[in-house]
Amino acid sequence: MTRLAKPGWQLEQHLWQQGCTHVAGLDEAGRGALAGPVIVAAVVLPQDLSEAAYDNINDSKTITEVNRGILAAHIKTIALSWAVGLATAQEVDTHNVLAATHLAAKRALDVLEAITPLDGLVTDYLKLSRPYAVLAPAKADSSSLQVAAASILAKTSRDAFMRRAHEHHPPYQFVSNKGYGSSHHLAALHDHGPCPLHRRTFKPVAECLLAHDPLGNFGTSDDTVSHISTSLTDD
């Protein structure tokens, strides 16, 4: 059986060699979903902990939901600082999903930098404009320990949001599909039309809108996030 390579500090080392001293890792969750926000997490981990402290931290896509929750709590305990930023479905529709991801990243970094002033950042191919060095290689979540940790925080924060969204919009089964286009989700869209958390500019939702409401009376997406989650840091 092939063993997954563990992420490490190689990407951060590249920035440290350029003179950076405070480097964070950043990743997102939810860009491809049909409903719900895009969420970005950023984290700064200490370098002086034992290797065992970082055991099992890897790209969130390689980790089960239960283990992601355990690791997220662990990461929040050991991190020097961490933060989460959100862009709503309405912002995705207004700006496009990439621009909304940049907006969520800015919100996360603004919070993080109030705790830990940064002079370097590693992202998973998210080419952000910041007043310091940004390294954005593809698949950084499988090679950078901090980006992997950020991927876990982003994914668990978004999953928690979508579980709460399920309580308000149960037909779509957000508790299981987290807003992605599962067969059940697509069938519920067909039967009920979109809810306020759906991204109107995404093709399956747009087609459903046209079928249900040719005159365009369904309105716009509106993530009134306060009625679902007052704080992404609670989870």
Image (cartoon, helix red, strand yellow):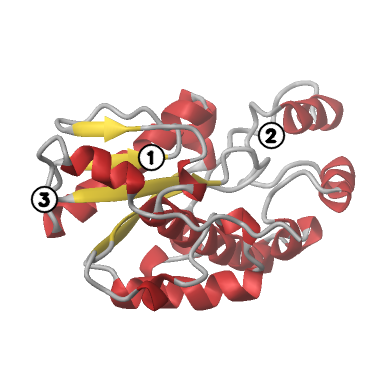
Q: Residue 209: horizontal and vertical position, in percent?
A: 77, 30
Q: Is residue 76 above or below residue 27?
A: below
Q: Which mark is residue 117?
A: 3
Left or right of 5 in this view: 79: left
Q: Is residue 168 above or below residue 201?
A: below
Compare marks 1 and 3 and give the one earlier in the sequence: 3
Name the secondary structure under disc 1. strand
The amino acid type of the residue labelled 3 equals Pro
Q: Residue 173: horizontal and vertical position, in percent?
A: 77, 60
* Nearer the observer, 109 or 190: 109
* Nearer the observer, 91 or 101: 101
Residue identifier under label 2: 218
The amino acid type of the residue labelled 2 equals Phe
Which residue is drawn at the image coordinates 62% and 46% (left, top)?
Answer: 196
Compare marks 2 and 1 and give the one earlier in the sequence: 1
Q: Is residue 109 above or below residue 149?
A: above
Q: State the image quarter where residue 35 is shown.
A: top right
Spatial CA span between label 2 and label 1: 37 Å
Left or right of 144 in this view: 203: right
Q: Answer whether labels 1 and 3 touch (C-beta < 8 Å).
A: no
Give the crowd class for mark 3: few <14, some 14-19, many >=20 residues within 10 Å. some
| Residue 86 visible somewhere in the drawing | no
Name the secondary structure under disc 2. loop
Residue identifier under label 1: 123
Image quarter where the C terminus lies is bottom left
Q: Which mark is residue 55?
A: none
Left or right of 29 in this view: 19: left
* Nearer the observer, 27 or 200: 27
